[in-house]
Amino acid sequence: MKKRSLIPVSASAGFTLIEIMLVVGIITVLMGSAIFMLTGNLEFAKEQRARGDLQAITTQIRMYEMKSGGVQLTETQGLNALVGKGKGFEELPKDPWGQEYKYKVDSSSAKGFRVYSMGPDRKDDRGGGDDISSN
């Protein structure tokens, strides 16, 4: 006995080239708009990561000062004094733009120092301009 299919199969089963091209076009437009929307958030995320790194470095500077009996980190020592076993960092983090963070003694600051990233333009404005600073 021959079994019959309950679902009729027509000769035009499947998708046409026009339908497939339409779907591919819609997906392309959606992906393009998603990428466009996310590019602005990328710079914001980099700035937030830099601020988080600066907070961690500032904390390690305070720990250094406490361990050394209140002696402040000097500019000649720089942030390299925080690197090593038991000192805070195994290696210093780099900012999101691939540059090293900068340290300077700043008596006008409430902390007595300033840690900063040169920012997106990678020019050292000594904590001003587009630099992202701990103060």
Image (cartoon, rainbow, N blue to C red):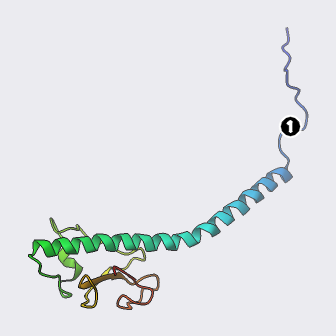
| Residue 94 visible within the image | yes
Q: Residue at x 22, y 67 (%)?
A: 90
- Up-down relation of residue 8 to residue 116 (above or below): above
Q: Is residue 74 left or right of residue 47?
A: left
Quadrant housing the N terminus:
top right
Residue identifier under label 1: 13
- Up-down relation of residue 109 to residue 60 (above or below): below
Secondary structure state at the residue bearing disc 1: loop
Task: Give the camera-side residue of 116 and 65.
Answer: 65
Q: In the image, residue 4 lies at what x, y percent? A: 86, 17
Extreme residue in the left direction: 69
Q: In the image, residue 84 lies at what x, y percent? A: 17, 69
Q: Is residue 54 left or right of residue 37?
A: left
Q: Quadrant of residue 110?
A: bottom left
Task: Give the camera-side residue of 59 and 6.
Answer: 59
Extreme residue in the top direction: 1
